[in-house]
Amino acid sequence: MRIAMIGTGYVGLVTGTCFAETGNDVICVDCDAEKIRLLQAGGCPIYEPGLEELLQRNIAAGRLRFTTDLPSAVRWAKLIFIAVGTPSRDDGSVDLSALWAVVEEMAPHLAEDAIVVIKSTAPVGTNAAVTARLRELTGRSVDVATNPEFLKEGAAVEDFMKPDRVVVGARREEVLEILWDLYQPYLRTDKPLLFMSPESAEMTKYAANAMLATKISFINEIAAICERTGADINDVRRGIGHDSRIGFAFLFPGVGYGGSCFPKDVRALAAVARAHDVTPRILEATHQVNEHQKGILLRKIREHFGGALSDKTIAIWGLSFKPGTDDIREAPSLVLIDGLLQHGAALRVYDPEAMDNVRKRYGNRLTYCQHRDEALDDADALVIVTEWKQFVHPDFDEMKRRLKRPVIFDGRNIYNPHRMKDLGFTYYSIGRPPVRP
Ligand code: UDX
């Protein structure tokens, strides 16, 4: 199958590369010439486990190419995937300008039998609007399918290769058949390709992310109640998770969800609801709880130190919005860093992958440490924001030697409070009583 993938961001790059891996001919298009040059040379602009190796293998095999020339890629392709960004506007609604620019530019070059597939997350009605616009621009009816992605950063290649399901929204059976052929190699026997209307496919993507985000805000709210009542959220989480109707997934309390999807999609779905005279009460609560949760570590730190932080040095472990990625979009760490800086604290930060992105944002306002333990030197406390594996089993004696005071604020509950008490730490976590030596 000849595939053009327009947009080499997270989704486009992973999707295009994984399509090449099963033998398709793929050309990825982006207007960022520098990025395309890097990709042509086999470099990978994002950190994603397994991606670079897959990229290089498929480039070498001649199945994966990169270009800035959209018209010729569109003329050549049978399937044209649109995977450009759809960021939030200030009011929470979605900015579709990149998607529309691609639609306008591609229209004159579409082959007779080409199928356009919208991968970008876009509100209900986008497929119909793109279909109508392409009819205007080309004077004929062009097939437009909606095929949302459900990739998690840090596990995107794995998720693509082994999806729980593939959702295809299209108006004609023939389009479904072509996409079924394309996805068949990735579908294990018990994992379906679900065929539905484009509107339902568009809605499915938002509903999935909103449901997951709601679970996280729910458990964070329960954690807050646990803290005030002396209950332990970890026991409560296990207690409810064993109920098969509830399950364990996405019920880990923490510092709030971040990333490129949940915050944006929850707000966008709420905006769609309001535009259709539906009051999105749950979606609004999910968002509000999350905004509040992002401030939880700062509140705990200020309370511990009696408010003033201007003479304090704080070490921070973990800056990406979750482990396995260098992505800091909407990361809770940024809210914490901004708050601590505002209160005059000096910050020593460390992250295995996200340091460059954080440096671009904060410049010399932070001290960037090469190693996990170096961040601890002479700090009044350590704050853990992202649960990278290398933070789970540190040398606690070494930590105590380096820290000025043995105080830890753990935003991800990675340590056992009883053990921390025995080791001589003052230890704060989420939804569990604090312990002191
Ligand atoms: C998400 C969806 O999972 C994916 O299907 C969709 O395509 C894109 O958005 P991603 O943003 O990569 O993927 O990360 P995910 O692993 O879902 O985590 C999102 C955020 O929720 C992170 O900040 C994470 O720390 C937080 N989270 C997740 C929790 O706080 N608790 C949990 O139990 C799970």
Image: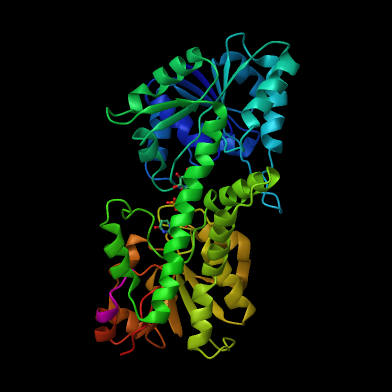
Q: Is residue 433 rendered to the left or right of residue 306?
A: left
Quick check: is 416 in the magenta stretch?
Answer: yes
- Vertical relation: 59 (above or below) 158: above
- Vertical relation: 384 (above or below) 354: below
Quick check: is 377 in the magenta stretch?
Answer: no
Residues in magenta, as a range: 414-418
Q: Nearer the viewer, residue 127 or 301?
A: 127
The residue sitting at 56% across, 16% down in the picture is 77
The residue sitting at 32% across, 55% down in the picture is 248
Q: Nearer the viewer, residue 404 or 149?
A: 149
**Quadrant placement of the C terminus:** bottom left
- Vertical relation: 285 (above or below) 65: below
Q: Nearer the viewer, residue 357 or 274?
A: 274
Image x and y of residue 164, in percent:
35, 36
Q: Nearer the viewer, residue 228 or 405?
A: 228
The residue sitting at 53% across, 91% down in the picture is 306
Image x and y of residue 424, in percent:
29, 87
Residue 99 visible in the snapshot: yes
The residue sitting at 68% across, 38% down in the picture is 96
Image x and y of residue 24, in percent:
43, 20
